[in-house]
């Protein structure tokens, strides 16, 4: 009996945890869940922009400040504390686009919305539409700049252009880049099966490039240096199709080469799981 009593006693929670749980009311649990949900949705919304990198930097800075305080590194802690104060003042300015978008989502009731994913039937016509449009424009020497969004969202880039929210088709893309139209000189941003925005302004690279590269190529490389997007460039002068990612440009692409780049972007991330579910439903 003594051995059993000892084992049971050893499993008891510490007194401070028992005290906390004893004071926890149902409304407190609801309060914690709401706060956790808001933090998660806020992070999810920031994840759709390049600002998520800045958020991670702020978290690292906060953790470093706490560690310096625990280790009693007074000078470094004082400097970090002052830096955090300045950052808190600057945050509304730095995150102005994200804050505005959050308020818009709240007003439209989209804060708790869910994003859709593509299936294989939707993927094939989209890839074919992009390839058809790109090489028709290349044949006609029509300049084009098409940004394919990946994991890192580009809502801040979309904000520099005109909202579109239209289904990706070859005809639609070709019409956007018709010469001397208002949206011709900007970039198109594609997310999933929809064109989110057109006429977008991309950041130019500061690197030295060969003279054969124009503004479109510089803009494509500049954006690829800051995010994980895949950018397709059609040269207006030569009609050459290029792929740009991770700060590197690969020229003279063929339709099959472009297809291999696009498949991982549009293909479902968990196709095997959905295949299992589909097969189970058929039984």
Image (cartoon, rainbow, N blue to C red):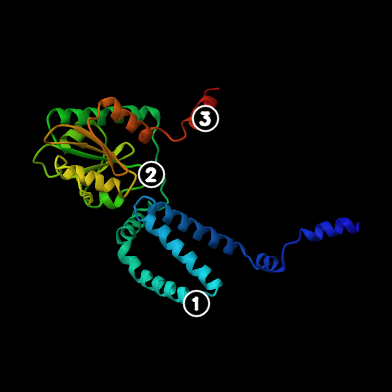
Q: Counting other residues with Cα less than 10 Å from the Cα at mark 1, is it few (<14), some (14-19), or many (20 or more)?
A: few
Q: Nearer the viewer, residue 191 or 65?
A: 65
Q: Which of marks 3 and 1 is nearer the N terminus?
A: 1
Q: Counting other residues with Cα less than 10 Å from the Cα at mark 3, is it few (<14), some (14-19), or many (20 or more)?
A: few
| Image-based side of 235 in relation to 117, left or right | left
Whether residue 199 can be seen here = no
Helix or strand or loop: what does disc 3 sit on? helix
Q: Does 67 appear above or below 33?
A: below
Of circles 1 and 2, the one toward us is: 1
The Cα–Cα distance between marks 3 and 2, rounded to whole angstroms, is: 25 Å
List the single residue furthest toward the top.
283
Residue tagged 3: 277
Residue tagged 2: 151
Where in the figure is residue 17, as x and y percent of width and height?
68, 65
The Cα–Cα distance between marks 1 and 2, rounded to whole angstroms, is: 40 Å
Residue tagged 1: 74
* Residue at the image point whose x is 38% and y is 55% from the top: 53
Q: Counting other residues with Cα less than 10 Å from the Cα at mark 2, is it few (<14), some (14-19), or many (20 or more)?
A: few
Q: Does 275 appear above or below 13?
A: above
Helix or strand or loop: what does disc 1 sit on? helix
Q: How many labels does the image show?
A: 3
Whether residue 249 can be seen here = yes
Q: Does 174 appear above or below 86?
A: above
The Cα–Cα distance between marks 3 and 1, rounded to whole angstroms, is: 58 Å
Where in the figure is residue 232, as x and y percent of width and height?
25, 37
Of circles 3 and 1, the one toward us is: 1
Where in the figure is residue 156, as x and y percent of width and height?
29, 53
Which of the 4 image quadrants contains residue 84?
bottom left
Which of the 4 image quadrants contains residue 89?
bottom left
| Image-based side of 6 in relation to 236, left or right | right
């Amino acid at each position: 009996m003594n051995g059993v009593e000892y084992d049971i006693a050893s499993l008891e929670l510490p007194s401070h945890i028992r005290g906390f749980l004893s004071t926890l009311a149902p409304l407190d649990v609801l309060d914690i869940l709401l706060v956790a949900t808001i933090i998660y949705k806020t992070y999810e919304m920031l994840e759709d922009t390049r600002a998520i990198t800045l958020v991670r930097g702020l978290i690292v800075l906060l953790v470093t400040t706490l560690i310096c305080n625990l280790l009693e590194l007074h000078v470094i802690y004082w400097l970090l504390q002052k830096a955090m104060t300045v950052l808190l003042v600057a945050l509304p300015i730095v995150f102005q686009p994200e804050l505005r978008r959050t308020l818009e989502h709240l007003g439209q009731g989209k804060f708790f919305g869910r994003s859709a994913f593509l299936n294989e039937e939707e993927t094939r016509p989209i890839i074919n539409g992009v390839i058809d449009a790109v090489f028709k424009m290349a044949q006609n020497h029509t300049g084009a700049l098409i940004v394919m969004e990946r994991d890192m969202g580009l809502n801040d880039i979309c904000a520099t252009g005109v909202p579109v929210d239209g289904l990706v088709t070859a005809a639609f893309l070709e019409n956007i880049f018709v010469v001397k139209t208002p949206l011709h000189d900007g970039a198109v941003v594609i997310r999933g099966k929809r064109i989110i925005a057109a006429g977008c302004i991309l950041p130019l690279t500061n690197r030295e490039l060969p003279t054969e590269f124009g503004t479109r190529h510089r803009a494509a490389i500049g954006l690829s240096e800051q995010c994980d997007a895949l950018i397709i460039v059609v040269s207006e002068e030569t009609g050459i199709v290029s792929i740009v990612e991770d700060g590197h440009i690969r020229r003279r692409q063929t339709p099959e080469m472009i297809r291999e780049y696009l498949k991982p972007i549009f293909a479902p991330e968990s196709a095997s799981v959905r295949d299992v579910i589909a097969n189970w439903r058929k039984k």
